[in-house]
Image: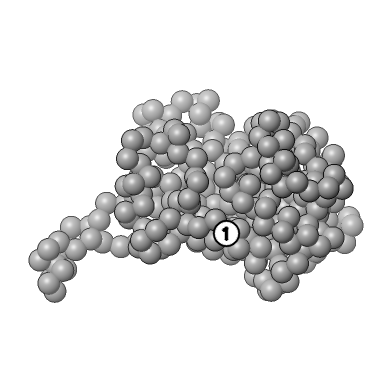
Amino acid sequence: MSFAAKTVVITGAAGIYGRQFSRAFAREGARLVLTDRKPAGLNAVARELALPAERVRLIPADLTDDASIAGFVAATGCPDIVICNAGIYPFGGLLDTSTAMWDEIMAVNLKAPFLLTQGFARKMIDNDVKGSFVCIGSGAAHVLRTNGLAYCVSKRGLDWLVKGMALELARWGIRVNAVEPGLAVGSANASFPPGYVESMSSRIPLGRMGGENEASDAVLFLCSDKASYITGAAIPVDGGSAIPRRALSPVGQKGVVSQQKESTPKEPT
């Protein structure tokens, strides 16, 4: 899946998945345009990649600001691939979510992918580029949690946005898909409650967290010619965490199904 001579835009490049995607595309020969609202984080990613200057551009942008997004799109040129990776997950249920928190979550997780896809798709159409977009979703699009209502709503909206954008852009040969990663080794957990990572890990059907390359391998596949007939899809890469299921009581495990449903995970997958 070589991406030599391809220009790849990655948002949220300083985050755990952003760094993984940057490394993966760099290994495959791509030219990278990386953005994050933290210039120091972008510089750290560039040092880690150690690419020649002609293969990486760093453009800080604030994805909560429409003008900043427009400036980023204008400064980037016409890419071949766009990875809408940036996202935020402040903990908060219905009664704890302020309007400011709601607006920020919707801006970064939902509005920014819309504006970025809209802006870059126009450039692709003008330049006859049959490009590919991948948005980073979540199992929260399918399973509600009581400690992240706004996040769940944003990811549910993103799921429909991906399908709608795929439908509209298909006539130009532009594909739009999503990858829904689960809890991965190295995921930022400083803001998680005590025991959060351990609790989530114990619920993963495959019995482990995601490895270094598993989400990025799915992203590479969807952006490659091997996926040329796939658009509007959302691929979960979460070890089975988002599969609807119920727990069995000790009696149920001997053959009688318990009537007690397993509580759905309240944390991000």
Report crowding for label 1: few under 14, some 14 to 19, many 20 or more residues within 10 A (C-alpha). Answer: some
Give above or below for 1 relative to 182: below
Give above or below for 97 relative to 151: above
Give above or below for 48 relative to 98: below
Residue 246 in the figure: left or right of residue 42: left
Is 26 in front, or is 15? 26
Residue at the extreme right: 127
State the count of labels: 1
User: Which residue is at a point 67% across and 53% down the rendered structure image?
Assistant: 23
User: Which residue is at a point 39% across and 58% down the rendered structure image?
Assistant: 208
Residue 207 in the figure: left or right of residue 119: left
Give above or below for 96 relative to 257: above
Residue 37 at x, y percent in the picture:
67, 32
Kind of residue at disc 1:
Asn
User: Which residue is at a point 76% across and 31% down the rendered structure image?
Assistant: 67
Residue 231 at x, y percent in the picture:
65, 66
Is 213 in front, or is 86? 213
Element under label 1?
loop
Please name the residue that numbered disc 1 is placed on: 213
Residue 132 at x, y percent in the picture:
73, 60
Which quarter of the figure is the N terminus placed in?
Answer: bottom right
> How is the protein colored in the picture?
one colour
Residue at the extreme left: 251
Residue 168 in the figure: left or right of residue 56: left
Residue 93 in the figure: left or right of residue 219: left
User: Which residue is at a point 56% across and 31% down the rendered structure image?
Assistant: 104
Q: Is residue 168 visible?
A: no
Q: Is residue 1 visible?
A: yes
